[in-house]
Image (cartoon, helix red, strand yellow):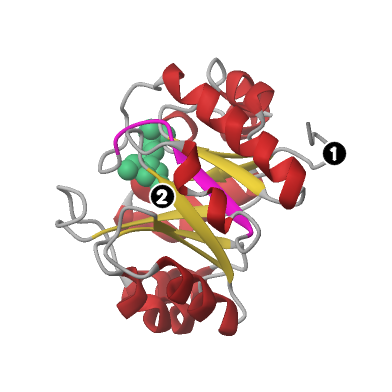
């Protein structure tokens, strides 16, 4: 098991106030967040629409935080350039999307941005095994993508463990992120299984004490 790396917290701005993004981002930065999780939804890959490249560009101007962009869109390959020029530091796209996985990873890498692959709850760990060597991070969805505030699916824990075990063999530096229903109770289960980047939306943004909430996840 690779627990050498620090556990990182990436608050999801899906639970922020979109009219108060700058102060909300500042609040999680001051609270000790390691990166910022930006959920992009196209109303097609998932039944919800959130934000796109213009908002990422505005966030880039507003903060120096590391921008972790989670693309829940059907054709990620076609939008890599837009998110790169908007200022993404990491681009995560779904293994279930329509784009060619290898070409999309290559395009992200060629732009000097970190590539990541995401798996939905119904997709097995094995779906990402062929790409573990080529990506910086795998994101294991612990809810069905599309909405914040859903309940954590504990049956995803063996998937995290399987990916961590495979990564130990071929890419020990691989980060494993979890997203959906992460709070002070579910975060330790994910860390125990091998996750090291914790996305949290409603728990962090809904907390009265942001720093205490972020600390309670680690
Ligand atoms: C869901 C998004 C998540 C969401 C998590 O599709 O990918 O990032 O914001 O929200 P919580 O932490 O409230 O489950
Ligand atoms: Zn997300």
Instruction: Tell me what residue is drawn at x 68 percent, y 22 percent.
Output: 192
Instruction: Tell me what residue is drawn at x 49 percent, y 34 percent.
Output: 204
- Front residue of 63 and 77: 77
Bounds of the magenta span? Answer: 136-144
Tell me the SS state at disc 1. loop
- Front residue of 204 and 46: 46
How packed mark 1 is, by other alpha carbons closer than 10 Å (few <14, some 14-19, many 20 or more), is few
- Report the image quarter containing ligand 1: top left
Instruction: Determine if residue 15 is in view.
Output: no
In the image, residue 111 sits, relative to residue 206, either above or below, namely below
Give the labeled residue for mark 1: 4
Could you tell me residue 40's position as x and y percent?
Answer: 32, 59
For this orientation, the residue located farthest to the top is 185
Tell me the SS state at disc 2. helix
Instruction: Tell me what residue is drawn at x 15 percent, y 57 percent.
Output: 44
State left or right for residue 145 relative to residue 218.
Answer: left
Q: Quadrant of the C terminus?
A: top right
């Amino acid at each position: 098991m690779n627990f050498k790396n620090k556990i990182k917290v990436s608050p999801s701005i899906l639970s922020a106030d979109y009219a108060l993004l700058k102060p909300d981002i500042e609040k999680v930065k001051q609270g000790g967040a390691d990166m910022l999780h930006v959920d992009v939804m196209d109303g097609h890959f998932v039944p919800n629409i959130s934000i796109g490249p213009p908002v990422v560009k505005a966030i880039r101007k507003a903060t120096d935080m590391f921008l972790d962009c989670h693309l829940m869109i059907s054709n990620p390959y076609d939008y890599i350039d837009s998110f790169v020029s908007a200022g993404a530091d990491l681009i995560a796209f779904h293994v279930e999307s329509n784009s060619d996985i290898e070409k999309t990873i290559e395009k992200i890498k060629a732009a000097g941005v970190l590539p990541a692959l995401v798996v939905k709850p119904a997709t097995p760990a094995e779906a990402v095994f062929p790409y573990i060597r080529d990506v910086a991070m795998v994101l294991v969805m612990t809810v069905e993508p599309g909405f914040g505030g859903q309940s954590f699916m504990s049956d995803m824990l063996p998937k995290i463990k399987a990916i961590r075990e495979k990564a130990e063999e071929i890419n020990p530096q691989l980060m494993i992120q979890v997203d959906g229903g992460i709070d002070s109770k579910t975060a330790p289960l994910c860390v125990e299984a091998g996750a090291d980047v914790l996305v949290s939306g409603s728990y962090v943004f809904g907390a009265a004490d942001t720093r205490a909430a972020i600390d309670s996840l680690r």
